[in-house]
Amino acid sequence: MDPKRLFEDPRLTTIGLFLEAHEGLVAKLEPTWKQYGLSGLDLNALMRLTRSPGRKLRMTDLAAQTGLSTSGVTRLVDRLERNGFVRREAAPGDRRSFYAVLTAAGATRVARVLPAYLDGVEQWFTGVLTAEQLDGLIESLRIIRDTVNPTAVTTSD
């Protein structure tokens, strides 16, 4: 590529817009989860557990879905467990594997935060797109997610 045109590459605009949109959404939504005593990572993990069969995920699956390392997800689950939102459960037949399981207190906390959180999602994200634009975005995000993080693919997106 011609060095003079390098900075005009439209891929820079595309990734820049994506990153700016993400950062802007986090800034708009963060006050909501903080109001309920959660971090964005806490809420992400709790929502993933609420949407998983049996309200539980193997720790390795939770790590993949949240983009955390094994030690990172251990620290997250430790914190959520201290707050009474999850508990660990041994995986049957595998002494080395554990599930993170949503507790009643965790489900209650998610149920409290979700109405305000979803209002923010509607105001700042889904509600600014037409139905067709949103369908296209969802399809595109799944393609990208499946490419860059195939271990995070679940049946309950």
Image (spheres, helix red, strand yellow):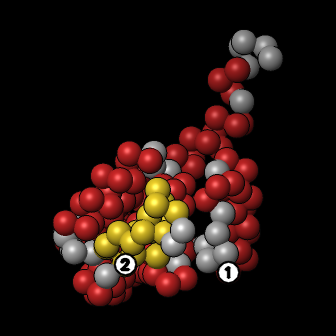
In percent of the image, x 55 and y 82: which residue is there?
Answer: 53
Q: Residue furthest top?
A: 3
- Can you identify the residue that label 2 sits on? 102
Q: Quadrant of residue 84?
A: bottom left
Residue 35, position as x, y percentages in the image: 19, 71
Question: For numbered disc 1, what is the local secondary structure?
Answer: helix
Q: Is residue 48 left or right of residue 130?
A: left
Q: Residues within 10 Å of mark 2 (few under 14, many from 20)?
A: many
Q: Quadrant of the C terminus?
A: bottom right
Q: Evaluate whether residue 22 shows in this view.
A: no
Q: Evaluate whether residue 8 shows in this view.
A: yes
Question: For numbered disc 2, what is the local secondary structure?
Answer: strand
- 40 w.r.t. 155: above or below: above
Tell me how far mark 2 sits from mark 1, CA to CA: 32 Å
Q: Nearer the viewer, residue 88 or 12?
A: 88
Q: Quadrant of residue 135?
A: bottom right
Which of the two discs, 2 and 1, labels the residue nearer the N terminus? 2
Q: Is residue 15 left or right of residue 88?
A: right
Residue 55, position as x, y percentages in the image: 46, 81
- 5 w.r.t. 77: above or below: above
- 12 w.r.t. 55: above or below: above
Three-letter amino acid code at the position of disc 2: Leu
Q: Nearer the viewer, residue 90 or 19?
A: 90
Q: Is residue 2 left or right of residue 102?
A: right
Three-letter amino acid code at the position of disc 1: Ala
Residue 34: mark in rendering: none
Q: Residues within 10 Å of mark 1 (few under 14, many from 20)?
A: few
In percent of the image, x 72 and y 30: which residue is there?
Answer: 9
- Can you identify the residue that label 1 sits on? 131
Residue 29, position as x, y percentages in the image: 35, 66
Q: Quadrant of the N terminus?
A: top right
